[in-house]
Image: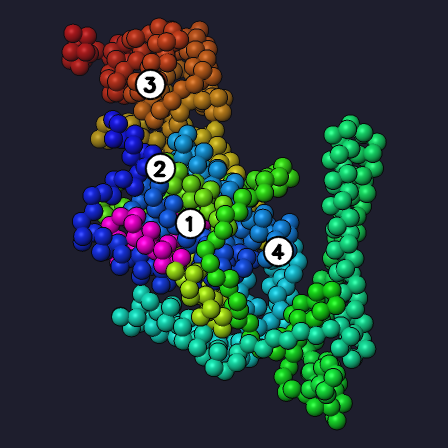
Amino acid sequence: MIRQQVLRIFPFLSWFPLSWLIFRGDLVAGITGALILVPKAMAYAQLSGLPLQFGLYTALVPAIIGALWGSSRQLATGPVAILSLMTAAAVTPMAVPGSEEYIGLVLLLTLLVGCIQLFLGVVKLGSAVNFVSHPVILGFMNAAALIIGLSQLDMLLGIPKGRSDFFLVDVWEMLGYIPLTHLPTLAMSIFSLVLMLAVKRVAFLAKSGVLVVVALTTLISALIGFEHKETGRIGDVVTPETRELVEEYGATAQRIESMSSRIAELSVQLRQAEKEGDHRKSANLRYRIELMGLDIKTAEQENRHRMRGIHKLYFVRTVPMEGQSSQLYQMGMAPAEDRTDGRRWHIRKIEQDVLRLSGGGEVVGTVPAGLPGLRIPAITVDGVLQLMSAALVIALVAFMESISMAKAMAGKTKQRIDPNQELIGQGMANIGGSFFQSYPASGSFTGSAINLQAGAQTGLAMVFNGFFVAVTLLFLTPLIYHLPKAVLAVIIVLAVTGLITPRAFRHIWKASRADGLLALVTFAVTLLAAPHLDKGIMVGALLAIGHYLYRTMAPRVAILGRYKDGTLRDVKYHPDLATSTKVVAIRFDGSLYFANIAHFEDAVLGAVADNHEAQFLLVVGDSINFIDSSGEEMLHNLVAQLQQSGIEMVFSGLKKQVLDVMRATGLYRVIGEQNIFSTENQALLAISCRLGEEDDACALFRS
């Protein structure tokens, strides 16, 4: 007993004692998994809107904590594509991706996700995940995978990224930029894709293929000078119309920043006024904040429109004379006598008076070396309220992804999985990660499969995996400076292609049209609501619960007749069955509770009304698993009503839990012990005897 309690608190103690063979297998599995995890972690961080090192941070602390306190010995906790996208979708409307405010909100989101998972695990609500049905998850996963793939278009083609509140609008905008495709970036994307597919076919390279491609493309990028970045000033733009557009953008951006600072000041004054109870001042400040917020939204919309125009412009850059700065001419407008550097430049970003120019492909750049420092998430009431719904959905999706993989592996390793302990492990992993600059993590399909294939026997494999990631952060980050972001985009696209499963839709449709429709609706809502992915899964979950309630509110009530083999069957499907004018037999395929008692009562009274000569009503109750107080009250009244009409209500096949309720409330006595039977055959025999149909069976029954 004491051992069980200790193992529940410290489940990793069950790994010990370790043999040398197990230790060696875990070490090999940990290193093998880390070789693949490092580039994928950076790719997923790119998807989440965070600096790339945050992917490595998420592959470090949560991975170790999840292995130590989870129940699965092969589950690999870390960054995954779905959660990366959901993180970006939850926080992007609140802050600029990559900014300090954005990072702070992501850490708060991670903490909330961990707390929700830990709470559900501690109170043993691991089964709560069942409220999100398989069709809902299928529709959500397919839509999310499609969104993830399409979101990488800008990186794959080297085109500007769409910026709006609707993902499909962004995709449409990016499609308009296709004529501006950066050919070297497209070539790098195609080359890395072909190379990754090729190395998968080579047996000894299959497991480390991603790392091989990353190393090779990084080397090529460095040798050919794939990246070209420069800075300029707004005054360097010579073409008048373009310069005016850029100046308007810069001035509006400064105005937005000024208004944002003013809102922050007014918010401080508002909190002080509310604390002092000055309602008039509070109302005035609140009005000014709301008005200024509307001005900011209008200005941001104007700048988004301007940036679309700026993104479509390409420039040539003059070679400066000594003591002068380079000048930027719109493509095709440079004077013939001016010498240019021969590159085609475009404006990536405008920061106050500074232009960030790009004349080549995007690369990872400088990744800060060193382990993640302790950073306590900033907890604010507004932040918690705004992120709570997204945190709840992410927590459930993360756990479903983790537990499904854990159960699949347990079937092969014959290991027992405790869903509640897994929730605790995942919750602690995210809580711990939130203090060390991680974003929400969950069990990874790819990492877990590699662990299993590489021979991992305990969670120590993920501890070794984390140590390798730490070594990468400490010593190897300078080596990935020239890694093209297009390669990371290809890694992401290949990772999510396995989540797009049209065959699964067809399979569900064949099994149940309602479930198939539910999966399609969830898919469509998720796609249309993107980037607000939580809406898709919440709508799907509500529809699934609504469909379940609808089915249980009106379960099938079958009028029964005698089949040729002596069994009772539904006359709806067997219209030639023998029936009796004096006995009506029905079967109720559901539990009796408040939502369906009216349906049951109407069915019984309707059956009696259709058979005026009936003296007995037999209820075959094999399918009644539960009866609540409303159901008991309805039966009580119905039995009395039928008795007054000269009809005896007889029951067969009632389960113990139903009979216990009847005995406790006195309904058993009202019905009468003589009207309750174990099987329908016994009930029909007794009814036959009461009707005076004397035979040898009746004599035997009476004895």
- Give the main secondary structure of the magenta stretch: helix
Residue bearing mark 4: 99
Q: Which badge, 2 or 4, is on the more N-terminal residue?
A: 4
Residue bearing mark 3: 657
Q: Is residue 265 visible?
A: yes
Q: Is residue 584 above or below residue 5?
A: above
Q: How far apart are labels 2 and 1 at the CA level?
A: 18 Å
| Label placed on residue 421 | 2
Residues at discs 4 and 3 in contact (Cβ within 8 Å): no
Q: Is residue 647 above or below residue 53?
A: above
Residues at discs 3 and 2 in contact (Cβ within 8 Å): no
Q: Amino acid at mark 1?
A: Val
Nearer-the-camera pick, 633 or 339 = 339
Q: How far apart are labels 3 and 1 at the CA level?
A: 48 Å
Q: Which badge, 3 or 1, is on the more N-terminal residue?
A: 1
Q: Quadrant of the N terminus?
A: top left
Q: Residue 107: give x, y in percent of width and height.
A: 54, 47
Q: Residue 316: give x, y in percent of width and height.
A: 69, 83
Is residue 440 shown in magenta? no
Q: Is residue 581 above or below residue 304?
A: above
Closer to the camera: disc 2 or disc 4? 4
Closer to the camera: disc 3 or disc 2? 2
Q: Amino acid at mark 2?
A: Gln
Q: How far apart are labels 3 and 2 at the CA level?
A: 31 Å
Nearer-the-camera pick, 686 or 610 = 686
Q: Amino acid at mark 4?
A: Ser
Q: Residue furthest front?
A: 323
Q: Is residue 621 above or below residue 355?
A: above
| Label placed on residue 61 | 1
